[in-house]
Amino acid sequence: MKHIKLLSLCLGVAMLLGACGQKKAETANVAPADNVYQFCFVNGTGDTVSMNDYQGKVLLVVNTATQCGFTPQYADLQALYATYHDRGLEILDFPCNQFGEQAPGTNEEIAAFCTGNYGTTFPQMAKIDVNGDNAIPLYTWLKEKKGFGGFDTTDPRGAYLHAAFKAQDSLYAENPDIKWNFTKFLIDREGNVVCRFEPTAPATAIAEAVEKLL
């Protein structure tokens, strides 16, 4: 009788452990939520930032450079931030030196340039890669969600970039990689990518899109 009770107890424990193991396996196989809140990165002062900190906000994520023909867009971004921040807009600035090495400074030098020349007050992150093996996961995800949208070739700079890229690769437009500085991704309050704006997109178009999400 004792042997039977002991056997029953062992079987019960085994079944319990098996169930726990199965539950752990099932939990491990659950994919993270497919929105922007799954990502973390480092800001310009070296602190880790979670996208969870921006839940419920409309986000504009932009890769920037301090020595680019599009650098004056910092003024447009600051104007956008000043207009809409109190209504729930956050702009996240990611300096990147991958395009013509046009962001060569340190994080501190880039921050001083932006605040000194354009009075920027939106959050600035540490310098990153947006393409290639060293691209941060956030940008890999953003590119998967919204591929290249095409340059505005009515803008001379857009026409130049289109011709330059096409000369190197006739199918360049099919590649979702970031093409140049000041590419922007607009994310809604639920963490979904809504729009991708190439550097030649007019500031008015970006403002209109932001307004619709607020």
Image (spheres, grey):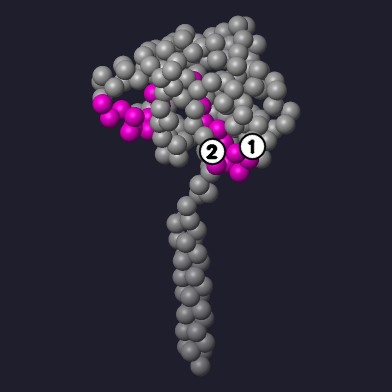
Amino acid type assigned to the residue bearing label 2 in the image: Val
User: Which residue is at a point 33% across and 33% down the rendered structure image?
Assistant: 174
Q: Quadrant of residue 129?
A: top left
Q: 37 or 6: which is nearer to us?
A: 37
Is residue 100 shown above or below 30? Answer: above
Q: Which residue is identified by label 1?
A: 213
Q: Residues within 10 Å of mark 1 (few under 14, many from 20)?
A: some
The magenta region covers 170-192
Q: Residue furthest right?
A: 86
Whether residue 80 is visible to the viewer of this picture, yes or no, is yes
Q: Eyeballing the image, is 58 above or below 10?
A: above
**CA neighbours of label 2 inside 10 A, class few (<14), some (14 to 19), many (20+):** some
> What is the three-letter code of the residue carrying label 1?
Leu
Splitting the image into 4 quarters, where does residue 165 fall? top left
- Residue nearest the observer in this picture, 31 or 196: 196
Q: Earlier in the sequence, mark 1 or mark 2?
A: 2
Q: Position of residue 200 (x, y in %)?
A: 47, 20
Q: Position of residue 187 (x, y in %)?
A: 57, 36
Disc 1 element:
helix
Q: Which residue is at a point 65% across and 11% down the rendered structure image?
A: 119
Q: Which residue is mark 2?
A: 194
- Judge by depth and name the residue closer to the eye, 144 or 10: 144
Instruction: Say if 95 sits above or below 49 in the image.
Output: above
Q: Residue at x 60, y 39 (%)?
A: 188
SS assignment at label 2: strand
Residue 112: horizontal and vertical position, in percent? 59, 9
Residue drawn at the location 49% of the way across and 27% of the way down: 197
